[in-house]
Image: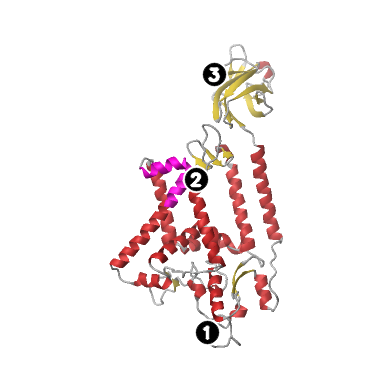
């Protein structure tokens, strides 16, 4: 039963349940608590250190390994450079991440929520700050109920000051991914950064402070959609947090020297409820609020050790194994390979392979061509038909390149560039490295060779001294016959 909710009193009053702050008890040791510690510090360390990692991309190129360069309009991830028109890579990565989440859920339940989610990580950190300043669960509960005095005011001020500092560090770290980390950090602390930078830090840091300091489990219950459809990701072989009811019931407090014959092993100490960060009672079955952190397992195992009973009253196992043990079977078989996991593996393989192949074979020259609409065409004094185009060449390498441009599709057609060559069948174009060159281009064609109102025409761009070729198709407008 959720301990942070009280039913509204009958006979009037509010129709909504009152929310009570959850003060989870500290778990001193255990497999899951240790795993949460390691992952929390590892994730936080990577998040704050990663902007300072360097990657040599050559002269005049950003040397930050992970960078979202807003001014340069591209993203960098070590050796990968993504341009704005390649946003489909981001779509592919998001799809890959979603399938990975489903795959993780099918195998190990809400392992993401319990150990890797930023909300979980920062909430756990904020709770530890409270514990260090005030004390463990009972002390924090009494502290909240105590009247305001100087001691309470000072301790509250310390807690919120540390929370704000953590939130500010979160906001600063996130901001450093959008510019040179060393320079931005210097500008931030010397008050030389722009107003937008400080606003961004305040927004990200403010949300960290509010969500991890105040909203906490409410984010998991009401704001995160994953808890709503998590059950669709599980099957009878998914590893989830389960209470072994067959072994624990009927529950009753344990007295010294009392035999456990004829009764359940659950001593109703409620330690599993007290350590739960979302305040649920796992003995009531799997619930939407369960984030799968496993702290209830550590707490229960500690109590089983204390009373001399076998561990595993609360287990991290599949429904199949729990049911097997309830029927007297071994209940030790974990079926990882099944139709659901095979399907997710295939999807991840296809998406991942597609992204890798696309990155490995992508062109380093992109062309965009736009036919002018006003006017669609012009008849020149010598009878030739002229069409205007805006021709853009993107050179995606950091070196100047020379290209050859020619036409196909209309016999006798020639080109001219405003401010450049005129009436040529083939022209050379020099494009600076890592830039877009935009040309105002005219194409002239003999009237006798333009027989339709719309004729297909192809622009063929070839790198000089290379074998790369980019063909761009457009239309050539004429009077028709």
Q: Secondary structure at mark 3?
A: loop
Residue at 61% in and 15% down? 423
- Name the residue tied to disc 3: 418
Residue 47 percent coordinates (x, y)? 50, 51
Q: Residues within 10 Å of mark 3 (few under 14, many from 20)?
A: few
Quarter of the image holding residue 146?
A: bottom left
Asked if labels 2 and 3 touch by Cβ distance under 8 angstroms, the answer is no
Residue 213 percent coordinates (x, y)? 42, 60
> From the viewer's perspective, is the residue at label 3 or at label 1 nearer?
1
> From the viewer's perspective, is the residue at label 3 or at label 2 nearer?
2
Main SS class of the magenta portion in the image: helix
Residue 1 visible here:
no
Q: What range is drawn magenta here? A: 169-190
Quarter of the image holding residue 136?
A: bottom left
Quarter of the image holding residue 454?
A: top right
Left or right of 264? Residue 200 is left
Of mark 2 and mark 1, the one earlier in the sequence is 2
- Name the residue tied to disc 1: 254
Residue at 70% in and 65% down? 335
Q: Residues within 10 Å of mark 2 (few under 14, many from 20)?
A: many
Of mark 3 and mark 2, the one earlier in the sequence is 2
Q: Secondary structure at mark 1?
A: loop
Residue 394 visible here:
yes
- In this view, 474 is above or below 167: above
Residue 63 percent coordinates (x, y)? 52, 38
Left or right of 313? Residue 330 is right
Residue 345 percent coordinates (x, y)? 68, 54
Q: Secondary structure at mark 2?
A: helix
- Name the residue tied to disc 2: 51
């Amino acid at each position: 039963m959720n301990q942070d909710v009280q039913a509204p009193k009958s006979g009037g009053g509010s129709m909504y349940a009152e929310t009570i702050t959850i003060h989870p008890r500290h778990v001193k040791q255990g497999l899951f608590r240790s795993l949460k510690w390691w992952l929390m510090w590892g994730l936080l360390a990577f998040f704050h250190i990663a902007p300072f990692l360097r990657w040599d991309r050559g002269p005049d190129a950003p040397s930050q390994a992970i960078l979202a360069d807003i001014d340069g309009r591209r993203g960098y991830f070590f050796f990968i450079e993504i341009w704005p028109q390649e946003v489909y890579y981001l779509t592919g990565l998001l799809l890959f991440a979603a399938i990975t989440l489903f795959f993780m859920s099918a195998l190990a339940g809400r392992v993401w929520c319990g150990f890797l989610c930023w909300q979980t990580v920062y909430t756990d950190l904020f709770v530890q700050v409270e514990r260090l300043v005030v004390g463990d669960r009972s002390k924090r509960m009494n502290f909240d109920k105590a009247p305001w005095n100087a001691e309470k005011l000072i301790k509250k001020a310390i807690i919120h000051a540390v929370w704000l500092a953590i939130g500010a560090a979160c906001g600063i770290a996130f901001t450093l991914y959008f510019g040179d980390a060393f320079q931005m950090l210097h500008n931030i602390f010397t008050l030389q950064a722009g107003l937008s930078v400080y606003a961004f830090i305040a927004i990200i840091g403010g949300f960290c402070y509010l969500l991890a300091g105040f909203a906490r489990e409410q984010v998991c219950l009401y704001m995160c959609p994953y808890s709503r459809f998590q059950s669709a990701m599980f099957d009878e072989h998914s590893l989830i947090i389960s209470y072994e009811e067959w072994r624990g019931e009927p529950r009753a407090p344990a007295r010294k020297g009392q035999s456990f014959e004829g009764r359940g092993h659950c001593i109703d100490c409620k330690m599993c409820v007290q350590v739960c960060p979302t305040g649920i009672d796992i003995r009531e079955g799997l619930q939407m609020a369960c984030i799968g952190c496993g702290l209830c397992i550590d707490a229960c195992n500690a109590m089983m050790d204390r009373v001399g009973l076998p561990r595993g009253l609360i287990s991290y196992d599949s429904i199949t194994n729990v049911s097997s043990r309830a029927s007297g079977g071994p209940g030790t078989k974990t079926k990882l390979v099944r139709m659901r996991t095979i399907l997710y593996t295939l999807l991840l393989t296809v998406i991942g392979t597609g992204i890798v192949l696309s990155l490995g074979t992508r062109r380093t020259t992109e062309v965009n061509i736009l036919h002018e609409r006003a006017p669609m065409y012009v008849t020149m004094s010598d009878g030739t038909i002229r069409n205007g185009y805006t021709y853009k060449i993107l050179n995606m390498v950091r070196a100047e390149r020379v290209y050859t441009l020619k036409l196909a599709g209309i016999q006798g057609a020639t080109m001219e560039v405003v401010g450049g060559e005129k009436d040529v069948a083939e022209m050379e174009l020099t494009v600076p490295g890592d830039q877009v060159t935009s040309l105002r281009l005219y194409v002239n064609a003999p009237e006798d060779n333009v027989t339709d109102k719309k004729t297909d025409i192809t622009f063929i761009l070839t790198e000089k001294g290379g074998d790369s070729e980019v063909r761009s198709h457009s239309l050539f407008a004429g009077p028709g016959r």
